[in-house]
Amino acid sequence: MQKEIRLLSLVLLLAVGVHAQPDRWQQRVKYVMDVDVDVNTNRLTGKQQLEYWNNSPDTLHKVFFHLYWNAFRPNSMMDVRSQVLGEKAVNGRRDWDARVRDRISKLSEDEMGYQRVKSLTMNGRPQTLKEHETILEVLLDQPILPHTSVKFNLDFEAQVPVQIRRSGRDNAEGVRYSMAQWYPKLCEYDYEGWHPTPYVAREFYGVWGDFDVNITIDKSYVLGGTGYLTNASQIGYGYENKGEKVVRPKGDKLTWKFTAPNVHDFMWAADPTYKLVRRDVKNGPTLFVLYKPSTPANDAAWEKIVVAAEQVLPYIEKHFGEYPYKQYSFIQGGDGGMEYPMATLLKGPGLGTVFHEWMHSWYQMVLATNESLYPWMDEGFTSFADSRVGDYYTSLTAEKATHGETRTGPADAPAGKKVQLPLHHYSAYQNYYSLALSGLEEPLTTHADHYNTNVAYSIASYSKGEVFLSQLGYIIGEELRDKTLLEYYRIWKFKHPNINDFIRVAEKVSGIQLQWYRQYWVNSTKTIDYAIDAPAEEDGAVAVMLKRIGLMPMPIDVEVTYTDGSKELHYIPLNLMFGEKPAENDTKRIVHEAWKWTHPTYSFRLSRKLSEIRSIEIDPTKRLADVDQSNNMTRLQD
């Protein structure tokens, strides 16, 4: 009997373990596409076979596709939205996207973009189509039942627009084609329903799946992008294996055959003058750079990318997780920097942008939150990561400089001089403060396309999102924050997590309750502001009075420095945490009773006299996003 009880307990324990893992259903796709590009007319025709698995418990009576390039036509939603925002002045500047401005309204017929689905069948039967500019609604003649799959077949055509935003032809640097958002892409259906988001300005959300893409184009063009080239021996241009003989088929065109497993989008770029740089990383991915040669200095900067990427990859994988694909490409193109699976489009070779776009591979190409709803969970987390990676790379190049070696990175100090590394995330805090005090801030729960200003969207998504993670290190301790990031990546990769998924991982790792942090930092625009009152001596001890001026409560670190040079850290948890962070260094730490969030003031006592105190400071590490730090320190002795 006892053995049976133990066996039953084991079964129940295993069942609990299984249910403790993410079990959110996801749809699945398999794209097979054949595309023919006419480089003289800048048009393409394509056939798409799409297998779609409805893994949801729901019956689907319609599906939706994105037709992104229809945004690049006068009077489109993107056109009007950009011009309307441009009518506003923020800090003396028009608030439109400087890359878009009113350019779409001025496009001629042969400069515009379009995507047209000429026919669409489901399991061989024609379906009813209804176009809503950048969204195609498909009214199904038969519903797609739960846990079944169907096959769609599409014939489509498109005209590549003049490059304005992300995709297009003939960008400012002369890249012929930046082919992003170029095919009819099935919209995501998840536990929140359909996401047929019109293409107005912002980011993307897609269904996980496999892509087989054949691109036929003039044989002088060199291509790069998402996926592995499967016919390199017919293509060459540096893709072939060392010593492999390249035999190109006869004719004026070549067909490039790519396969991309387990991705949620597919991008490619093409130019007849691209130079390809290849680096095979030991026990890692193959790295490619494709760029248009120009000056020796510019060419050297592009070719340095693969060297820098290989140098920082071990650091990235140690702190943020393993890169899951066998290849990554850095490609000149687009209008700045824009991430896609296994590749990025880059306007220039600056390593700051390079590291940022590459880190998107972790936070958007692998975790892949819904960027329309949670842009800050991609951009902010990516900005946090690229700040760390950039500082690490600077430390590598600075170390070489101090040994008199040739520097290969952005360190500014001359050889032989000690380099002062930048404070992590300093600029993100400064940007956040400017937004919080501007009157323009909106909650991070705001849909990416619906911010009232571009400025508020940009700072919220990038800087406030970055501060979210830096400040989390202040709340639970940086070691546990870093462990949270690795565990979040391990558990939720390829699963489209949301903010609550992240918070729950952080709670489990730290043992601290964090829903309050989400409610204040994400769901509101309440700010943090704490102050120290002048300390007073009572009965041989010093009473320290703290005030919460801002509306967001936080745990508080208070550092006391004595005249003899010794220090004490007085740690006051927030009662909503139901726990406390571990000590982060060797400084003597005294943990006080938790501060109740309802109480605007808090006091604690020091055992030493007022005359022995040099200074008292709130948050000496400057990780607390206090919008007014002028009242965070009181200095009693010089």
Image (cartoon, rainbow, N blue to C red):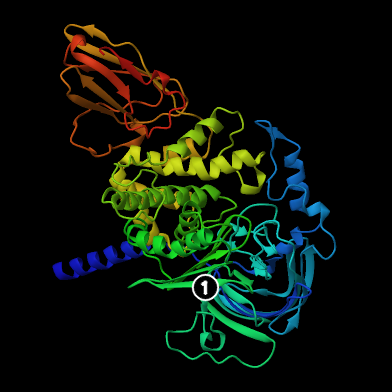
Position of residue 240 measured from the top left corner of the image (x, y, whole percent): 48, 84
Residue 126, above or below 161: below
Q: Is residue 444 visible?
A: no
Q: Residue at x 49, y 47 (%)?
A: 380
Q: Can residue 367 be seen in this view?
A: yes
Position of residue 400 measured from the top left corner of the image (x, y, whole percent): 30, 53
Position of 232 with respect to 38 (left or right) is left
Name the quadrant of the N terminus: bottom left
Q: Is mark 1 on a helix, strand or loop?
A: strand
Q: Which residue is drawn at 76% across and 59% down?
A: 72
Q: Residue at x 28, y 46 (%)?
A: 479
| Res. 560 image quadrant | top left
User: Viewer-proximal residue, 27 or 405?
Assistant: 405
Residue 1, above or below 478: below
Position of residue 483 measured from the top left corner of the image (x, y, whole percent): 31, 52
Total residue callouts: 1
Q: Which residue is drawn at 49% across and 91% down?
A: 245
User: Viewer-proximal residue, 372 or 637?
Assistant: 637
Position of residue 21 measured from the top left corner of the image (x, y, whole percent): 37, 62
Position of 129 with respect to 419 (left or right) is right
Position of 535 with respect to 454 (left or right) is left
Name the quadrant of the C terminus: top left
**Label 1: few (<14), some (14–19) or many (≥20) C-alpha neighbours in 10 Å:** many
| Res. 582 image quadrant | top left
**What residue is disc 1 on?**
276
Residue 631, above or below 372: above
Disc 1 marks a residue whose amino acid type is Leu
